[in-house]
Image: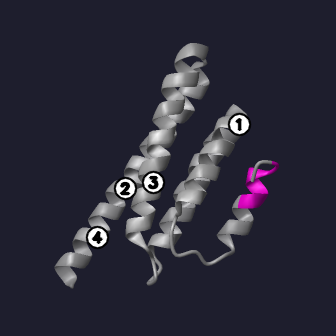
Amino acid sequence: MNKDPHKAYEEIRNKWLDCFSDEMAEVTLKVFKESSNADKRDIALYTEDIVRVMMNSAEFKDEQTETALNNLKCGLKSFLEQYCSSNKNSIAVAHVNNFIEVVDKLLEKLKKQKHREVLDG
């Protein structure tokens, strides 16, 4: 993923995964931090797409995914505070804020899905 996030996304997309894990969150954050601004936007979109597909799986592990997404969000907020505030790179700040919004939307969708399962179950 470090060398070519686009290729890594295609490989991940073609695999069956049952959760977004802590390891995936850690690697995603690392690559996001090290990527160009052009790739930062794509990484957020790829992450959103991957998690949405996982959420449709019958074997989806929502608790692990929720934990990992929260860890990713914390890492993004920390990155925003440390790097972006000292660098004054408004483009990078916008990309980090966008990624945080993407993660928040995924967490909200996950919460709604879990609530529906409780009502249906």
Viewer-nearest residue: 67 or 112: 67
Mark 1 → mark 4, Cα distance in angstroms: 34 Å
Residue at 17% of width from left, 78% of height from top? 119
Residue receiving disc 1 = 34
Q: Is residue 6 magenta?
A: yes
Q: From the image, state whether disc 3 or disc 2 is nearer to you.
A: 3
Residue at 57% of width from left, 63% of height from top? 50
User: Which residues fall within the magenta stretch?
Assistant: 3-8
Q: Position of residue 88 (x, y in %)?
A: 57, 14
Q: Is residue 25 magenta?
A: no
Residue receiving disc 2 = 107
Q: Which label was assigned to residue 69?
A: 3
Q: Position of residue 95 (x, y in %)?
A: 56, 34
For this orientation, the residue located farthest to the right is: 3
Mark 3 → mark 2, Cα distance in angstroms: 7 Å
Circle 3 SS class: helix
In the image, residue 76 sits, relative to residue 104, either above or below, namely above
